[in-house]
């Protein structure tokens, strides 16, 4: 009994130590401030509700959870699912299997049709195309006025920020030049890095664009 | 959310004469910060809040901590006026008012002011008699406990600070149980330095003795199920757990991350807490300097350099560096020894690590918990 009490105490402290993010297990990834959690939901064709919960530290991931009565949620069991609106997805080892999403036999990208899903697809996958995503220490992402998804990344606490655009679900590094931000603004890349003046603008104005659709 | 605490010495006047008080020579001084002077302090606090939030690009919380002396000796009308001004000048910015009190004598009028301005109270009580005496030399514990009961009856919640020194280090388990029975979390504050001008024999205790006593308190706290928060043990436990699962945190860095705690003296001098009382170390004076002037001044730059050098001296070679953020080296003044680590803090970190490893909380088990928690999520 005394051991149970102690186990619970240590377990609670451990939860606080890692702030709920499995990515925190990578010692290269350092949480920046509080973990932000965003969440949205969709209905399955059997009428049950799935909650998609995104935890943001440096790198993001999305989990699918089954909404039960009240505020309770539980892990969505592995398997194939079909949304009430028609799209399908698969959960493997508790995570959404994006390969399955993109390997739709009809060549359709069903998730892009649904506002929130478009964000999931646009946001969660591209970082994994980096050689070492776990080295990333800060991420700013936004949809610019040209309709493309941009990432500004820092890999290492004191490193410069590099800019990328998502092409075919992979990050392609931007050459020196001027690129669009939301609301008619622009940012500069010089010497391979986002200039300090531009970084301020990116950090301020990207926030507005990364909110999930209501 | 990142917090910036401003410990403000509204007045040094105090009705107690705690033997270890580092303000001993000033405790009879009735001087207090004038209302107009508060305006300058609050303007600086507001400016710093905005500057830092812009620098960090995220919201922060400012905490104003009334400190002394005994703040509740100040007239209720004065507290009322200044607290209203504090809320007014920080309107729109996330902020909290806090007040550290010995709670020996407190009027209903004062408690009304505290409630009206939503001020969080911290009560200083060592639980064990012997050191916290009135100016006439009488014990204070019974009166303070009676006043805590008044707070409870009024529905006012509060936190607590217990100084660990000679008089109570053998009874810290009892101290824990006292606060646990009341459901009040507390901070145990190991006494690193007493007043220079007083004999310290009655309460002085070595760092080794403190480390042993606080380590024993840790065992008791964990084995009781951590039913109340005991700072800084809860923070140190998290540091060690991070070490065991390999999760690093950014090092305390005033330049990049801003200040964590600043001290405002009754004369307006601004200091870091580990350089309190060192006139040459002041960053500026809030009665005469704006925050912008202070932040761009040579004194501030020199202070940042001293902090960085101290981190390098104290944390270099510490096995907990990178998992502990290094702030314990800067929280309180202490006598540095060549090649030495933080007094008490480092040794208790060592103890917590040994305790966890020998109790079966090794990396494999902790990581296993995390993986199962990950799936359960």
Image: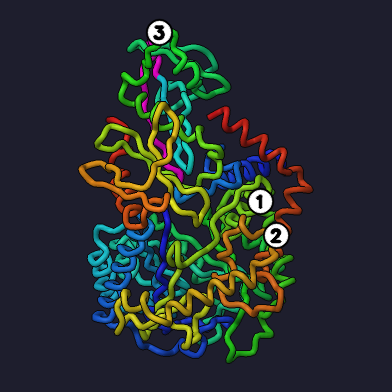
- The magenta region covers A35-49
Q: In which chain is the residue bearing label 1?
A: B
Q: Quadrant of residue B199?
A: bottom right
- Gap between marks 3 and 1, in whole Å? 49 Å
- The residue beneath circle 1 is B243
Q: Main secondary structure of the magenta part?
A: strand
Q: Nearer the viewer, mark 3 or mark 2?
A: 3
User: In the image, is residue A47 part of the stretch drawn in magenta?
Assistant: yes
Give yes or no for contact between labels 2 and 1 (Cβ–Cβ under 8 Å): yes
Disc number placed over residue A106 in the picture, else none: 3
Report whether residue B40 is seen: yes
Q: Chain of mark 3?
A: A
Coordinates of residue B208 in the picture (x, y in percent): 74, 71
Query: Residue at coordinates 53% horizontally, 63% vertically from top-left?
Result: B252
Residue in view at x 68 percent, y 75 percent: B166
- Residue B154 in view here: no
Q: Nearer the viewer, residue B235 or A159?
A: A159
């Amino acid at each position: 009994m005394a051991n149970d009490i102690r186990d619970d105490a240590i377990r609670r402290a451990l939860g606080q130590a890692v702030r709920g993010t499995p990515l925190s297990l990578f010692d290269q990834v350092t949480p920046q401030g509080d973990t932000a959690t965003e969440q949205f939901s969709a209905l399955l064709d059997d009428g049950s509700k799935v909650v998609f919960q995104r935890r943001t530290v440096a790198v993001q991931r999305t989990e699918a959870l089954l909404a039960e009565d009240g505020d309770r949620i539980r892990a969505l069991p592995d398997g194939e699912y079909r949304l009430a609106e028609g799209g399908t997805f698969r959960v493997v080892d508790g995570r959404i299997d994006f390969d399955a999403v993109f390997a739709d036999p009809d060549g359709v990208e069903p998730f892009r049709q649904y506002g929130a899903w478009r964000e999931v697809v646009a946001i969660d996958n591209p970082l994994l195309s980096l050689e070492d995503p776990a080295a990333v220490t800060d991420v700013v992402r936004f949809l610019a006025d040209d309709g493309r998804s941009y990432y500004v990344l820092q890999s290492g606490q004191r490193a410069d920020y590099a800019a990328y655009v998502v092409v075919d679900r992979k990050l392609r590094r931007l050459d020196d030049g001027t690129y669009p931000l939301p609301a008619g603004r622009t940012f500069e890349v010089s010497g391979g890095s986002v200039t300090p003046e531009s970084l301020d603008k990116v950090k301020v104005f990207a926030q507005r664009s990364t909110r999930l659709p209501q | 959310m990142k917090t910036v605490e401003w410990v403000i010495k509204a007045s040094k006047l105090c009705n107690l004469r705690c033997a270890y008080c580092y303000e001993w020579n000033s405790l009879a001084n009735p001087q207090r910060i004038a209302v107009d002077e508060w305006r300058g302090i609050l303007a600086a606090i507001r400016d710093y809040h905005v500057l830092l939030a812009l620098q960090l690009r995220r919201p922060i919380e400012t905490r104003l901590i009334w400190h002394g002396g005994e703040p509740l000796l100040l007239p209720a009308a004065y507290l009322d006026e200044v607290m209203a001004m504090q809320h007014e000048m920080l309107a729109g910015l996330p902020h909290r008012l806090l007040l550290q009190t010995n709670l020996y004598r407190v009027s209903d009028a004062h408690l009304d002011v505290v409630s009206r301005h939503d001020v969080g109270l911290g009560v200083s009580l060592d639980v064990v008699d012997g050191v916290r005496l009135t100016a006439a030399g009488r014990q204070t514990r019974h009166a303070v406990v009676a006043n805590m009961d008044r707070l409870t009856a009024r529905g006012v919640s509060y936190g607590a600070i217990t100084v660990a020194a000679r008089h109570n280090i053998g009874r810290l388990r009892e101290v824990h149980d006292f606060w646990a029975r009341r459901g009040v979390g507390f901070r145990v504050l190991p006494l690193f330095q007493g007043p220079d001008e007083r004999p310290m024999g009655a309460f002085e205790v070595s760092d080794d003795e403190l480390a042993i006593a606080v380590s024993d308190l840790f065992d008791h706290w964990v084995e009781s199920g951590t039913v109340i928060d005991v700072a800084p043990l809860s923070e140190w436990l998290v540091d060690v757990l991070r070490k065991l699962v390999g999760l690093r945190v950014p090092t305390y860095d005033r330049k990049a991350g801003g200040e964590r705690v600043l001290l405002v003296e009754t004369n307006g001098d601004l200091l870091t807490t580990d350089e309190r009382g060192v006139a040459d170390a002041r960053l500026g004076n809030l009665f005469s300097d704006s925050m912008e002037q202070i932040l761009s001044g040579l004194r501030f730059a020199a202070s940042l350099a001293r902090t960085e050098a101290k981190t390098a001296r104290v944390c270099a070679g510490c096995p907990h560096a990178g998992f502990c953020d290094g702030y314990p080296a800067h929280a309180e003044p202490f006598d540095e020894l060549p090649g030495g680590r933080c007094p008490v803090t480092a040794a208790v970190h060592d103890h917590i690590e040994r305790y966890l490893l020998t109790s079966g909380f090794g990396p494999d088990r902790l990581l296993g918990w995390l993986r199962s928690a990950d799936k359960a999520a």
